[in-house]
Image (tube, rainbow, N blue to C red):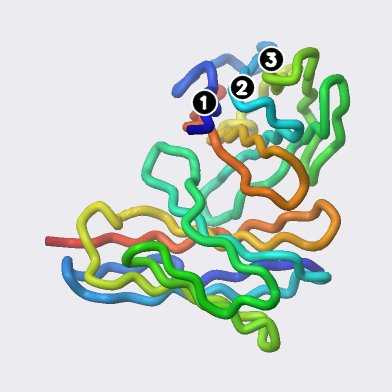
Amino acid sequence: KNQVEQSPQSLIILEGKNCTLQCNYTVSPFSNLRWYKQDTGRGPVSLTIMTFSENTKSNGRYTATLDADTKQSSLHITASQLSDSASYICVVSARGFKTIFGAGTRLFVKA
Amino acid sequence: DVKVTQSSRYLVKRTGEKVFLECVQDMDHENMFWYRQDPGLGLRLIYFSYDVKMKEKGDIPEGYSVSREKKERFSLILESASTNQTSMYLCASRVKLGTEAFFGQGTRLTVV
C-alpha cells in the first residue's frame, strides 16, 4: 500500500534553533519527493523537489535529503525564524499519476 | 507567478444545500485537482481533470461532482451537503504530469 508517514506530528522549538523533520514512504514505483510548506489558512507552497538520483537539495535555510534505498527523507531547517511556524508536508509521487501526501508536521517557532 | 484562485475563503452552508466551490488558474495549466484536508490526515484527492471536459475520480469522490467547461476553471460541486463534508478544500493546478502543483489559498467549508 502506498503510504507516506511523517514525524513528529508537531514540534516546538526556540527561534534561532535548528530542527529536522522526517518522512518515510512506501510509494512505488518512485518518481519524486517534494516538501511543501503550508502556512495557517493558506495553500501549500513547494520548497524542494528531489528525484531518485538526488540525495540533497537546498532552498535557503531549508535542506532536504533523500535516501531512496531506505525510502526516507528529511527536511532540515537552520536558524529557525518565527515565520517558519507552519505545517510541512512531504509529498511522494509515483511514476504514472499517483501522488501521496503525508499528514504533515506542525512546527511552532517561539521567541 | 502562477495564480490559483478559489472563490471563497470561508463558507457556511446548511445540510442538504447544493454547494459550488470555484477554482480558477491563470497559467494555462492542463491538470487541475480538488483535495480536502482534515486534521491528522494528509490531503485526499477528490477529483482531478487532465484537460477541458475531462474528469477522473480520485480517492474520495462520493458526494462530490466536478465540472471543467473551460481550461482555466475547475468547479467542485457538493450535490447535497452533509456535516461530514465540513473541511478545508484545496484546489491545485499544474502544467502536466510530473511538474509542480500550485495550490489555491483554500476554502474552509462548514456545513451546519
- Asked if B15 appears above or below B55 in the picture, the reply is above
Residue A68 is situated, as x and y percent measured from the top left of the image, at 68, 82
Q: In the rendered structure, which disc, 3 or 1, sits on the residue that comes first in sequence?
A: 3
Residue A111 is situated, as x and y percent measured from the top left of the image, at 11, 61
Q: Nearer the viewer, residue B38 or A47?
A: A47
Circle 2 is placed at which residue position? B23
Q: Secondary structure at mark 3?
A: loop
Residue A20 is situated, as x and y percent measured from the top left of the image, at 39, 76
- Asked if A41 appears above or below A58 in the picture, the reply is above
Circle 3 is placed at which residue position? B16
Q: Secondary structure at mark 1?
A: strand
Q: Report crowding for label 2: few under 14, some 14 to 19, many 20 or more residues within 10 A (C-alpha).
A: many
Residue type pointed to by label 1: Thr
Residue type pointed to by label 2: Cys
Circle 1 is placed at which residue position? B110
Q: CA distance from mark 3 to mark 2?
A: 22 Å
Badge 3 and badge 1 in a common chain: yes
Q: Residue at x 53, y 16 (%)?
A: B7
Residue type pointed to by label 3: Gly
Q: As drawn, is B106 to the left or to the right of A72?
A: left
Front tag of 3 and 2: 2
Residue reaching furthest to the left: A111
Q: In the rendered structure, which disc, 3 or 2, sits on the residue that comes first in sequence?
A: 3
- Asked if A68 appears above or below B69 in the picture, the reply is below
Front tag of 3 and 1: 1
Q: In the rendered structure, which disc, 1 or 2, sits on the residue that comes first in sequence?
A: 2
Q: CA distance from mark 3 to mark 1?
A: 13 Å
Q: Residue at x 78, y 28 (%)?
A: B63
Q: Secondary structure at mark 2?
A: strand
Q: Report crowding for label 1: few under 14, some 14 to 19, many 20 or more residues within 10 A (C-alpha).
A: some
Question: Which chain's residue wears label 3?
Answer: B
Question: Which chain's residue wears label 2?
Answer: B
